[in-house]
Amino acid sequence: MERKKVSIPYLHGKKARGEPISMVTAYDYPGALTADAAGIDMILVGDSLGMVVLGYESTVPVTMDEMIIHAAAVKRGAKATFIVGDMPFLSYQADVKEAIHNAGRFMKEGGSDAVKLEGGAEMADTLKAIVDAGIPVMGHIGLTPQSASKLGGYRVQGKTARAALKLLDDAFALEQAGAFSLVLETVPDRVSELVSKRLSIPTIGIGAGAGCDGQVLVFHDLLGYFDRFSPRHNKRYTNLREIIVNALSEYRREVETRAFPTAENSFAIDDAEFQSLLQALGEVHPEVMPG
Ligand code: KIV
């Protein structure tokens, strides 16, 4: 049976019923097809694209044009899953009009259902302007990778009472501005549980413990497809890299030993047609002569 398209009221209903929300990143058509087939609630076309797909050192160099190409590919694969496009660095920070324009590109060109942007209370006005333009927005607080340099690296956020209070203030400001959901990244579990309980919108955690209303992981991390590093918050459900390297090595061996391709993987030409071809070329090979 075809799954019904996931909507914001459905996600809010899950929070109200205490049912956890599943989210995973995806960056292309096969990734989206598989996330959709697995019944995942939400796909994030994350700017982690820059690190796990494009090979950049951080998410900072990712451009809007790159994000749109990948968002559109995800859209073609995910029929029921709710799709969130991640606004890349400097696509929303400098100017509110530019932020609305870029958020709109995710909907018009990428086919996304919503966008996500990083930042706390300081981003509330921008977030509200995008929501007022008719585009649902997900907030993202705690460890915000686009400002890792300002935060002093990829560190746990909200570890002191004061920092946790600031996190709560940021969460309320974004909820007030109209965010439909919030990502909490790398935050102590008791702090994110407290934030989650005090908000009416669902929180989606990554490295933020079990008290969030849902969880998100990076596709390549959870599948063990990317082994440059495995963050502590990640759980590897399989080792795709090893599976792929083994398959590719076997393929290479079979090519080198001519074990591949066999007749099963090849296509035949009619004997008479081949004979005519050879005659046209002035060659006659007795082994292909009929009879
Ligand atoms: O880009 C991304 O993958 C993200 C998640 C870590 C939430 O923003």
Image (cartoon, rainbow, N blue to C red):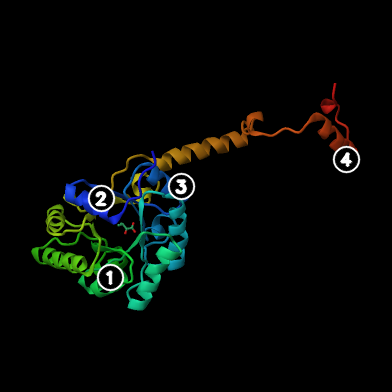
Instruction: Identify the residue shown where x is 29% and y is 71%.
Output: 132
Could you give the CA–CA distance between mark 1 and mark 3, rounded to whole angstroms? 31 Å
Instruction: Identify the residue shown where x is 23% and y is 54%.
Output: 12
- Circle 3 is placed at which residue position? 30
- Hey, which residue is sitting farthest left in the picture? 161
Task: Name the image quarter holding the N terminus.
Answer: top left
Give residue 286's quadrant in the image.
top right
- Circle 2 is placed at which residue position? 215
- Circle 1 is placed at which residue position? 127
Q: Earlier in the sequence, mark 4 or mark 3?
A: 3
Please indicate whether residue 289 sits to the left or right of residue 218 in the image.
right
Crowding at dot 1, Cα within 10 Å, few <14 / some 14-19 / many 20+, comes out as: many
In the structure shown, which secondary structural element does the residue marked by tag 3 occupy?
helix
Crowding at dot 2, Cα within 10 Å, few <14 / some 14-19 / many 20+, comes out as: many
Is residue 70 placed above or below 271 in the rendered structure? below
In the structure shown, which secondary structural element does the residue marked by tag 4 occupy?
helix
User: Is residue 238 shown to the viewer in this render?
Assistant: yes
Residue 9, given in percent of the width and then of the height, sits at 26, 55
Q: Nearer the viewer, mark 1 or mark 3?
A: 1
- Circle 4 is placed at which residue position? 281
In the structure shown, which secondary structural element does the residue marked by tag 2 occupy?
strand
Q: Nearer the viewer, mark 2 or mark 4?
A: 2
